[in-house]
Amino acid sequence: MRAATYEKLADADGRVTDRLIELYEAIARGGAGLIITGYALVHPSGRATPRMLSIHAESFIEGLRELTDSVHREGGVIAVQLVHGGRYCPPLLLGGKPPIAPSEMYDRFTRMNSRAMTEAEIWTVIDAFADAAWRARAAGFDALELHAAHGYLISSFLSPYTNLRDDYWGGDEERRSHFAEEVLKAVRNAVGSDYPVLIKINADDLVEGGLKPDESLRYIRRLEPLGLDAVEISGGVREARVKTIRPDIHRPEEEAYFRDAGKLFKDNLSLPVILTGGMRSRDVMEGVLESKEADLVGISRPLIREPDLPNLMREGKEKADCISCNKCTRFNKIDYVRCMQIKE
Ligand SMILES: Cc1cc2nc3c(=O)[nH]c(=O)nc-3n(C[C@H](O)[C@H](O)[C@H](O)COP(=O)(O)O)c2cc1C
């Protein structure tokens, strides 16, 4: 699976561009089993990065339809990832306003306190996820994935590290799960019972006081009966010392860095489990599948360098060329996301 990867290739409003379509065609031709888009914005208050994809109004459907048609023509299957950026949205992208989040909290990246959402704002964003889900289906996506990982809005409601509320939306584990539950219920209602809905969740926030694997697993158990079709495991929030997108993965032991969580989730769930994070060699990927640590593996950075990696591996290639230098993640410095090891 091509794990969700923001490309900085939508236009300034978040509309699909020709270059974005060309990229997805290349990924589809390259043999990925399922393609997840870069995160797509469900509400203007959740804009996390410039030129991210948008799905927050009807006017985006036409461009998204072109994207899904192109992928389908190439034989691909594509899901859109829905996001609200929450406390990570830079005020510059919010007309100078502070980002909204479950609780007021300083963030050293935005250099600002987030503002705690009101009850009305919470329901507005839940509705925005549902409307975006309906648009996803209307635009021809084969599935959607809720981005509930990495410290963005849904993730920050689930996490005891960022959710300091004491009301229906926070205060203990059960109440911290309500936002994700209400989003999933509303989304399920919008797309119907026969449409695949995936979720990407942190098994571990990798910060003190953050979400841990057991709690994360319990959240998935609560969400599953509301209509979940698969769970993708990731981890880390921005301030974590050990990163979501880990650099310098060279040895097999450094690959598949959330595989323990994969095992925990696989052993305790009947849902399909997707494991993402540091998969580089065919041996490790096959090992993860064979030892039942996941049903699917997700890769992001290797496909930035080699969009046709799945086919190359089918033909015998053993290891991705990606060296995990992470230069592709310097979003402020690069004009769009590409492998900086390859000279243009
Ligand atoms: C350039 C870039 C953009 C990313 N954008 C997203 C995103 O939009 N949504 C998301 O859930 N994860 C995003 N990620 C994280 C990846 O999906 C993945 O979890 C992480 O990179 C680890 O997998 P890898 O070792 O295969 O790169 C991004 C990663 C990179 C490198």
Image (cartoon, rainbow, N blue to C red):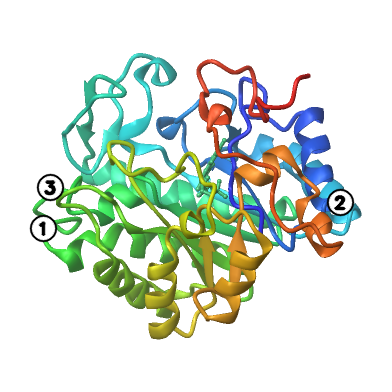
Density class for disc 1 (Cα within 10 Å; few <14, some 14-19, many ≥20) is some
Against 93, residue 184 (above or below) is below
Placement of the N terminus among the 4 image quadrants: bottom right
Question: How many circles with numbers are drawn on the protein?
Answer: 3
Q: Residue at x 17, y 33 (%)?
A: 105
Q: Mark 1 touching mark 3, by CB under 8 A?
A: no
Quarter of the view holding residue 88: top left
Amino acid under disc 3: Leu
Which residue was labeled with disc 1? 171
Amino acid under disc 1: Gly
Q: Residue at x 49, y 75 (%)?
A: 293
Against 273, residue 162 (above or below) is above
Judge whether residue 134 can be spotted in this image. Answer: yes
Mark 1–mark 3 Cα distance, whole angstroms, equals 7 Å
- Circle nearer the N terminus (1, 3): 3
Mark 2–mark 3 Cα distance, whole angstroms, equals 45 Å
Placement of the C terminus among the 4 image quadrants: top right
Which residue was labeled with disc 2? 29
Judging from the image, what secondary structure is the residue with disc 2 in?
helix
Answer left or right for 311 relative to 302: right
Which residue was labeled with disc 3? 164
